[in-house]
Amino acid sequence: MSQKALVLIGVAVVLLFIAVWAIPTLVDVNRYRPQIEARLEDQLGRDVSLGAMHLSLLPLGFRVQQVVIAEGPEFQTGRPFAQAQMLYVQPKLLPLFRGDLQIHGLELSRPTVELVRSKQGTWNFASLTVRRKQDGQPVSIERLKIQDGQIGVTDLQQNEPRTVYDHIDLDLRDFAPDKAFSMTGRAHITDGGKQTIAFDGKAGPLQRDAVGRTPFDGKIELNEVSLAGLERVLNLQVLENSDAVLTGTATLKNDQGMFASNGKLEARTPRIRGVDIGYPIRVDYDFQGNLNENTLQIQTADLHLGKTPIRLKGRIDGSATPAKIDVNVSTSQASLGEAARLAAAFGLAFSADTKVDGLLNLNVHAQGPFNKPLMDGEAAARNVEISGGNLRQPVHVDAMQFSLSPHVIQSNEFTATTGRTNVRAQFTLSEYASNTPQVKASLSTGNAEIGELLNIAHAYGVSTVEGVKGSGTAQLNVIVAGPIKQTDNLTYSGSGALRNATFEASSLAKPLTVRNADLRFN
């Protein structure tokens, strides 16, 4: 190649660079803004406002500042439906030469979108119109990209306050509302920490009136997501006043509201109903569910409460208030302390400041309201030791067995020991899921220390001995029966004796002393 030809090529390259740099500054694309706004308003059925526009050649496209898409007139939120600091529009080249503006890709920088559901259950985006080709097929966008976006969700039907998803990155390929499209994304729940939810899969066609029925098949990853944040997003009253840090991966397949999911999750620093559990909870699960009916089928769920394994299988109906369960729960040689801590959180047994140690075997079917289920099965505990709280010394039980039926929980006869005092006991709890549970318990002891007897009563949550101190010895052979929540209405029958007894309580002006007394209860 001659030197002259090389010079010509060099000049052409320089001129090309000059053109690429100069043309966007010489061509004023803002004069087309009214036509573009009109075209977008016609496609979306909403008022559209565009800021300053600039042309770029490599790649060919328009950069638009301060884009605002108005809200529909039936949704008075005080906010626009969508706005973005910057919109990059990449048109298709050949149709553009024919004067037809067809969009190849859209990229929005720091957009804000408001999703609102009315009291009648209609979402605000359902009224957006969709432009169609002459053959009736919807116009698709080969790529729709969102960088650092924010979505606000307001549910007027559920009377829920606005929830914000922040720092959203979303990439859609071959996007059209009426067909399936590929998507990857990442969202941040604004509660501090990492709090990210990442997803990758295929979605669509979009179901405008029922977003939960939009098909999706892909993978979801949680990275230190707040359970409290999810509770507000999903409106799960079961999780009220609860929190944890969730990390794990799961697969999710949803089709018309019927979904299936399996995965592994870990909840660190869990707090349930205001009680700090004190150990991580891990779960390996396989679920199926129906978002239309708000039901969940637990195929398998292997929980680990710290080191304690528990297996669950059954069904949860979230459409009722409170939620209803039909679940089988089983564990073998589990730590009673970890299980008792969780039970205390749900108000089922013990207080939150009571420490319980021992081993637990459990095989129970629980059915009914989540907060008051009816149970059927068996439970057994051994080497039980209860301490902490108001107990001055530990209470020990070698072995306890329980038989559970839908209306009665019945124990075997067991011996509770504290210090030098032994108490033989047996109890039956009937109508335990009602508002008026009934108890019938038999207690017997000989030559027991009164202070130690009060200690055992504390351990089992007998409220009438709160703040009572005592000394001396006692013999008792008593049957107690009546409403467990109304201790004033309990009835006592049997006999006993007190020797050199002294009682102190805040309700007594001075200590009560009994030298010798034979007792008879009726």
Image: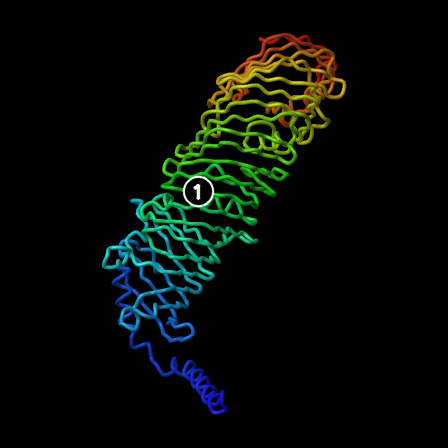
Residue 318 seen anywhere in this rendered image of the structure: yes
Q: Nearer the viewer, residue 479 or 61?
A: 61
Residue 197, percent from left and from top: 50, 50
Residue 510 seen anywhere in this rendered image of the structure: no
Residue annotated with mark 1 = 253
Lateral position of residue 11 relative to residue 100, left or right: right
Q: For the residue marked with disc 1, what is the amino acid?
A: Lys
Which residue is situated farthest in the right direction here? 420
Q: Quadrant of residue 276?
A: top right
At 59% from the left edge and 25% from the top edge, which residue is drawn?
A: 463
Residue 354, percent from left and from top: 65, 31
Residue 236, percent from left and from top: 45, 40
Q: Nearer the viewer, residue 220 or 175?
A: 175
Lateral position of residue 331 relative to residue 253, left or right: right
Which residue is situated farthest in the left direction here? 134
Q: Nearer the viewer, residue 38 or 76?
A: 38
Q: Quadrant of residue 487?
A: top right
Residue 253, percent from left and from top: 44, 42
Which residue is situated farthest in the bottom direction here? 4
Secondary structure under the numbered disc 1 in the rendered image = strand
Q: Nearer the viewer, residue 395 or 467?
A: 395
Against 101, residue 186 (above or below) is above
At 56% from the left edge and 41% from the top edge, which residue is drawn?
A: 264
How is the rendered protein coloured?
Answer: rainbow
User: What is the quadrant of the C terminus in the image?
Assistant: top right
Q: How many marks?
A: 1
Sort mark 1 into few (<14), some (14-19) or many (20+) by Cα contacts within 10 Å.
some
